C-alpha cells in the first residue's frame, strides 16, 4: 500500500508540464558579448553547426561552380542586420528586416574570383529590446573546391547472403577499422565483414577519404 501512495505523486508529476514563470536573463553574459556565435542559419539548405553540433558557426566546402545561399528564418520581431565577409569578396551591407520576413542572401559564384577561402559574419540586432546593444550572430568559413574534384563515395553497410559487410570501395588503399576497442589496418581491401566494426577511415592512394561511423 505504501508503494502505491509513493508512486502516484511521481506519475502525476510526470504527466503535468512544469509551471515555470517567464523571467528575463539580463543578469547573464550575452552570447554576443561572450563571443559565442549562436544564431541559426542555413547554407545551401544545411544548418550551420560546429563539430559539437552547436548552431551558429561552421566550416563549409563548396565547389566554386556553385552559388552560396544563406537563409535566416523569419523572426517574430523586426531587426537590423549587418553582414560582412572577406573584403575581396565584396559582400558587406547593413539592412532593416521587417517582422516575420525571411532573410536570404545570395553570393553568386562570379564573386569568388581567385579566392580559395572566405569568411562571413552576420549580426542580428532585435528592435523589440530597448537595451539596444543586445544582438546575436553567426559566423562561417567557406573553402572553395575545384569543380572537377570527385570525392569518394562513403563507406556503406550492405547485407549479402545473410551477412553484413562494409563496402570500402575499389580505391581503398589503406583503411583503419575500429573493432573491439582498437584500430586495425586493412591494406587494399575493398570490403570487410561488418561485425564488431563501429568506425572506418579509408584513404585512397592520392589521399581521398571515405569513412563510416565518424
Image (cartoon, rainbow, N blue to C red):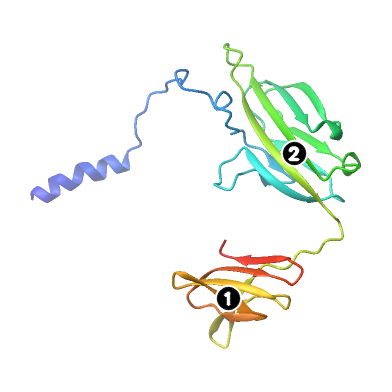
Where is residue 95, by image quadrant?
top right
Residue positioned 73% across, 66% down in the render? 207
Q: In the depicted view, which residue is nearer to us: 20 or 171? A: 171
In the picture shown, does residue 87 fall above or below 115?
above
Q: Tell me the SS state at disc 2.
A: strand
Where is residue 205, by image quadrant?
bottom right
Residue positioned 27% across, 40% down in the render? 13
Q: Decide if residue 2 is on the left or right side of residue 49.
A: left
Residue 66 location in percent, x, y? Answer: 84, 49
Residue 67 location in percent, x, y? Answer: 84, 45
The reply to whether residue 102 is visible in this rendering is no
The reply to whether residue 31 is visible in this rendering is yes
Q: Which residue is mark 2?
A: 70
Say which label, 2 or 1, has the lower sequence index.
2
- Which mark, by number, is residue 185? 1
Q: Decide if residue 207 is on the left or right side of residue 129.
A: right
Q: Decide if residue 165 is on the left or right side of residue 23.
A: right
Q: Callout 1: few (<14), some (14-19), or many (20+) C-alpha neighbours within 10 Å? A: few
Residue positioned 77% across, 22% down in the render? 94
Nearest to viewer (mark 2 / mark 1): 1
Residue 180 location in percent, x, y? Answer: 44, 73
Amino acid at each position: 500500500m505504501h508503494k502505491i501512495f509513493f508512486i502516484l505523486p511521481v506519475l502525476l508529476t510526470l504527466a503535468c508540464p512544469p509551471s515555470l514563470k517567464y523571467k528575463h536573463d539580463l543578469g547573464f553574459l550575452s552570447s554576443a558579448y561572450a563571443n559565442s556565435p549562436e544564431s541559426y542559419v542555413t547554407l545551401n539548405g544545411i544548418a550551420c553547426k560546429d563539430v559539437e553540433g552547436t548552431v551558429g558557426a561552421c566550416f563549409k566546402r563548396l565547389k566554386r561552380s556553385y552559388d552560396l545561399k544563406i537563409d535566416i528564418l523569419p523572426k517574430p520581431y523586426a531587426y537590423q542586420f549587418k553582414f560582412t565577409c572577406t573584403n575581396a569578396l565584396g559582400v558587406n551591407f547593413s539592412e532593416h528586416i521587417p517582422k516575420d520576413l525571411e532573410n536570404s542572401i545570395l553570393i553568386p559564384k562570379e564573386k569568388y574570383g581567385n579566392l580559395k577561402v572566405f569568411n562571413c559574419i552576420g549580426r542580428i540586432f532585435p528592435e523589440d529590446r530597448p537595451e539596444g546593444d543586445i544582438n546575436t550572430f553567426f559566423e562561417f568559413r567557406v573553402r572553395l573546391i575545384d569543380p572537377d574534384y570527385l570525392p569518394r563515395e562513403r563507406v556503406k553497410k550492405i547485407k549479402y547472403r545473410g551477412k553484413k559487410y562494409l563496402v570500402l570501395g575499389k580505391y581503398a588503399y589503406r583503411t583503419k577499422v575500429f573493432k573491439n576497442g582498437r584500430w586495425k589496418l586493412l591494406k587494399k581491401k575493398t570490403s570487410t565483414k561488418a561485425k564488431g566494426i563501429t568506425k572506418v577511415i579509408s584513404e585512397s592512394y592520392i589521399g581521398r577519404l571515405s569513412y563510416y561511423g565518424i
